[in-house]
Image: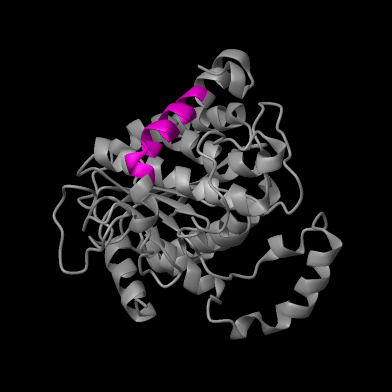
Amino acid sequence: MVKLTTVTAANVAFIKKQSLTAVFVGATNGIGEFTVRELCKTHGHEGPSLRIIIVGRNEKAAQQIMTECKFLCSSVDFHFVQGGDISLLHSVDKSCDEIRSILETTKTTSIDMLVMTQGKVEFGPRIDTKEGLDKSMSLLYYSRMRFIDNLIPSLLCSTLHTGARIISIYAGGAETMGTLYSSDLSLDQFKHYSFANCRTHSVAMKTMYLEDLADKHAGKLSCSHMYPGLVVHKGFDDPNYPLWFKIIWRIVKPFTRFFPMYLTPEDIGQRVLFLASGQRYAPKGSEIDAETVDATDGVKGGGAYSVTYTNEINDVSKFYQNLRVQNFKEAVLQHTEDVFRAIERDGVFQPSKAG
């Protein structure tokens, strides 16, 4: 485990060193909100300029977060983007248009950090969006990769000497939880869909996509996806969860602080920020140091990282060995491109008609 004192010290040095522009998707609740608050608290009232763009559905919650954060960091330049339903790629595109407009208006075109936490656990069957994707998989994979795809020019404009940072929070290292169906990546077949399989597909596909980004933009971009441990927040009290979960959660909740993977809101906020600081998670081909860790391809400083809640890496390279031989990465990249193009062209993805 990376000591929390090490994490916070690195974050202070990083955040107070240079101006930063950070985009947070899904930050009106939960881990995204906690990270925004810790970023503002760490920056404080003095230091280089700090601009934060929050993309979310709940404007009232966003305004409250921004107001409270102003007491922690009076100089922060906040912007809110009403994302709507960002399980829809159309809504993602609209959100990115607004982000670009904000960047143009403020005459700073770069993004230094893109932090994505959008998503919701669904325990039941597949729920189709009007664009033909499963809602959970879209939030956890497709919409996140679409945000990256749209915002990559601004990320590549970052002047951080450590490179821009893409951070995705959800189940890093959970590849083996379910079954991977390489011939049905979108889990369109009813018999293939389950919570566990959705998680496995979202994580494995994300790994391949992030590795490709790290390769294409060596020296300029670092990508991490993280398992955040157990962080208690309002999302666990969703009234739409099944009765069995509500009962179990009511029993378990008072004891969560004794779980080994339990993190406070402050701790997880700092540990997410740590993914952006220093050369521990270095862009591929950039300068590395003794702290630099192995990427998902097993290469030290490879640029794409699977990280656990302790800020140590998940050793996932063995999981992908056979998949790489089977050209799994190429299949994921082609599939993702097919999904993007089909929804752009037809407004809906139909696996049998994609291409």
User: Is residue 272 inside the magenta stretch?
Assistant: no
Quarter of the picture containing the N terminus is: bottom left
Q: Is residue 164 left or right of residue 256?
A: left
Q: Which residues are magenta?
A: 323-338
Colour style of the rendered protein structure: one colour
Badge count:
0
Residue at left 26%, top 55%? 18
Image position, residue 242 (x, y; %): 82, 58
Q: Is residue 326 magenta?
A: yes
Placement of 119 over or under 67, stated as above or below? above
Q: Residue at x 35, y 80 (%)?
A: 5
Q: Can you see residue 41?
A: no
In screen coordinates, is 162 left or right of 89? left
Q: Position of residue 261 (x, y in %)?
A: 53, 76
Q: Is residue 324 left or right of residue 252?
A: left
Q: Which residue is rendered at x = 30% and y = 56% of the image?
A: 48
Residue 325 image point, x, y percent: 32, 41
Residue 137 appears in the picture as rendered: yes
In the picture as drawn, the residue positioned furthest to the right comes out as 243
Q: Quadrant of residue 65?
A: bottom right
Main secondary-structure element of the magenta-colored stretch: helix
Q: Residue furthest top?
A: 345
Residue at 48% from the left image edge and 30% from the top image edge? 336
For the residue pair 288 and 322, the one nearer the viewer reads as 322
Q: From the top left corner, tell me how far across and down residue 89 is, in percent.
A: 58, 30
Q: Quadrant of residue 128?
A: top right
